[in-house]
């Protein structure tokens, strides 16, 4: 070991440096993690507690008599499988269509000649700045007049036009070398073939980012589904939970409510833990240039 | 060919984003109950009401309080967490993931979890306070406390996002700059305020704008924790309550929508056109 290396080691393990690392790094992070994780842990634990352990002035951490009754009760109060199924359908169908539309639109903006291309891009950019809540009332009237209240397509349709994904993918497609596509064009490949054979595969990480952010957004989506559905058979999970909260909120039946919260939170938490790299980069886009 | 690829998306954007902007502008001039087939012209009455009535003033007070406090608190706490995360120590990635995670969770689920914590009788917060001899505040009855409560929960959900964006900003600062200041024997606080913070100004600016936009659009937590609004009627929540809640006041809700759009659009346009060029690297 050379002399400089040795001094680096001494420096790294000097008492001062260890104290600084613990106080400046680990301690604040552990506090922050506790603040973040404890409420979620409390939710998960409470979802297995029977009612007497919830409605008490002397709560204990671990369930003394763990039970699945809370989950069974949620299933009775709102038709759980139906609501869960609705959420899955809305999330999958909505996300697939949105991602495909974003890919084809971004491809057109980058690789197909069109006179008004800049105007179209500007229109998409402006659409990105329109808060979805500002379109709520007219969209409600449009979908209602088409007979879309209390239907899954009524939940899915208004959110399909996608500016965010288009914008992100356009940036990615613009970085691709032109000769990559020119070679394919000489071979007689049409636009569709060039898109699926060349552009999409090399852009897979960006597409995955757009897809995951879209999936999480659809799953959590609340305001629009809340407005367009009032029959429980057609609700998505967050809307069903809103109903559950209004039924059980007054009675202190928090065991049921925590079981419901677990159902909407846990799937996203699992997906996030596995694929956080893509999700974080998608959600913090624009921050890091 | 262009339209074959981009047409469907453009059609959807026109019908469900652009057309609503125009029709809202029209609805906002009507005196119109939701679901009614008849409406009378109201001129600019809905807008006058939005800016001069006690109800409108209350909405602006709540919106501004909620936005200013959530933005400041998420950013200050987020920066502190980012500074802690900015060490090359084992396990830091797991910490980063955990702290970011609330940002991706359903606001409905998060609101339910915190309802259980804040419940004055059964909530764990009340239990802790009682064990210190204090009693739990009536979070749900007092409008001011209700606003504090939803602010706390919103910051809890949002601060990881700020932390991760700040962390990326910190990591883009060349380490030899910080090292040079260290050799000059500049103290930690001085290094932070004279060097790190100015170098972070683009990140601070980006986060300020995105946080204002998202705080003004907050809804899920507010709706779940205070279902019919109780000192928590920010602009989007009020829009919902007026249009689709107990009031069924479509014309007024449309006026709120128009103002919401104008305000958020102005903030975004301001960011893109104007200030971004004026943020200087130290």
Image (cartoon, coloured by chain):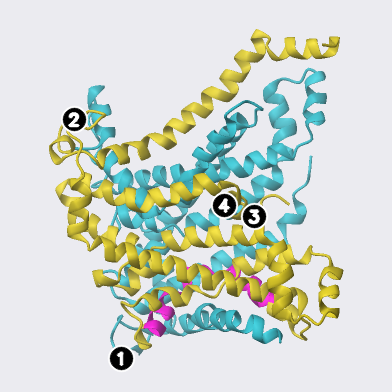
Chain colours: A yellow, B cyan
- Asked if the residue under mark 1 is in contact with the one under mark 3, i.e. CB atoms within 8 Å, the reply is no
Residue furthest out toward the left: A52
Q: What x and y, as percent, mark residue B137? A: 25, 37
Residue drawn at 17 percent across, 58 percent down: A76
Exactly how many numbered labels are in the figure? Answer: 4
Q: Is residue B12 above or below residue A236?
A: below
Secondary structure under the numbered disc 4 in the rendered image? helix
Spatial CA distance of label 3 from label 2 is 46 Å
Over which residues does the magenta segment extend? Answer: A121-143
**Distance in Å between CA atoms under marks 4 and 3:** 10 Å
Please tell me if label 3 and label 2 are on a single chain: yes
User: Tag 3, which secondary structure?
Assistant: loop
> In the rendered image, which residue does mark 2 sit on?
A64
Q: Going 26% across and 29% down the picture, which residue do you hit?
A: A61
Query: Which quarter of the figure has residue A122?
Result: bottom right
Q: Chain of mark 2?
A: A
């Amino acid at each position: 070991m050379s002399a400089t290396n040795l001094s680096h080691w001494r420096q790294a393990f000097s008492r001062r440096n260890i104290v600084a690392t613990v106080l400046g790094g680990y301690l604040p992070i552990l506090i922050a993690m506790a603040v973040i994780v404890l409420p979620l842990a409390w939710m998960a634990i409470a979802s297995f507690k029977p009612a007497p352990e919830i409605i008490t002035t002397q709560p204990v951490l671990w369930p003394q008599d763990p039970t699945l009754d809370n989950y069974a009760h949620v299933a009775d109060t709102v038709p759980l499988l139906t609501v869960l199924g609705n959420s899955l359908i809305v999330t999958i169908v909505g996300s697939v269509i949105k991602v495909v539309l974003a890919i084809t639109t971004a491809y057109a903006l980058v690789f197909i000649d069109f006179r008004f291309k800049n105007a179209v891009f500007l229109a998409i950019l402006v659409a990105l700045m329109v808060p979805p809540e500002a379109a709520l009332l007219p969209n409600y009237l449009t979908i209602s007049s088409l007979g879309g209240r209390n239907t899954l397509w009524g939940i899915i349709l208004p959110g399909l036009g996608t500016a965010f994904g288009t914008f992100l993918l356009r940036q990615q497609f613009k970085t691709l070398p032109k000769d990559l596509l020119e070679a394919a064009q000489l071979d007689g490949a049409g636009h569709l073939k060039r898109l699926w054979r060349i552009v999409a595969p090399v852009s897979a990480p960006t597409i995955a980012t757009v897809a995951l952010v879209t999936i999480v957004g659809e799953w959590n989506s609340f305001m629009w589904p809340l407005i367009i559905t009032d029959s429980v058979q057609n609700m998505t999970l967050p809307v069903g939970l809103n109903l559950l909260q209004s039924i059980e909120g007054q009675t202190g039946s928090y065991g049921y409510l925590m079981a419901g919260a677990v159902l909407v939170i846990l799937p996203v938490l699992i997906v996030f833990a596995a694929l956080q790299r893509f999700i974080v980069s998608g959600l913090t886009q624009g921050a890091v240039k | 060919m262009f339209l074959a690829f981009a047409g469907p998306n453009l059609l959807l954007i026109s019908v469900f984003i652009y057309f609503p902007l125009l029709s809202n502008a029209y609805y906002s001039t009507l005196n119109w109950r939701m679901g009614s087939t008849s409406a009378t012209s109201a001129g600019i009455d809905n807008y006058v009401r939005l800016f001069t009535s006690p109800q409108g003033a209350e909405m602006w007070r709540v919106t501004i309080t909620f936005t200013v406090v959530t933005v400041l608190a998420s950013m200050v706490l987020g920066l502190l967490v980012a500074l802690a995360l900015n060490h090359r120590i084992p396990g830091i990635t797991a910490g980063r993931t955990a702290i970011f995670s609330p940002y991706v969770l359903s606001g409905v689920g998060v609101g339910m979890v915190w309802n259980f914590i804040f419940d004055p009788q059964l909530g764990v917060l009340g239990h802790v306070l009682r064990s210190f001899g204090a009693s739990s505040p009536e979070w749900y009855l007092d409008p001011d406390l209700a606003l504090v409560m939803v602010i706390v929960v919103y910051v809890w959900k949002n601060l990881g996002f700020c932390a991760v964006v700040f962390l990326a900003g910190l990591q883009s600062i060349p380490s030899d700059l910080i090292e040079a200041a260290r050799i000059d024997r500049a103290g930690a606080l001085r290094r932070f305020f004279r060097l790190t913070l100015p170098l972070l100004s683009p990140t601070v600016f980006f986060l300020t704008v995105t946080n204002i936009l998202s705080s003004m659009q907050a809804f899920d937590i507010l709706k779940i924790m205070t279902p019919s609004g109780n000192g928590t009627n920010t602009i989007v929540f009020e829009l919902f309550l007026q249009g689709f809640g107990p009031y069924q006041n479509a014309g007024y809700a449309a006026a709120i929508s128009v103002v919401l759009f104008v305000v958020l659009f102005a903030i975004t346009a301001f960011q893109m056109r104007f200030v971004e060029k004026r943020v200087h690297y130290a």
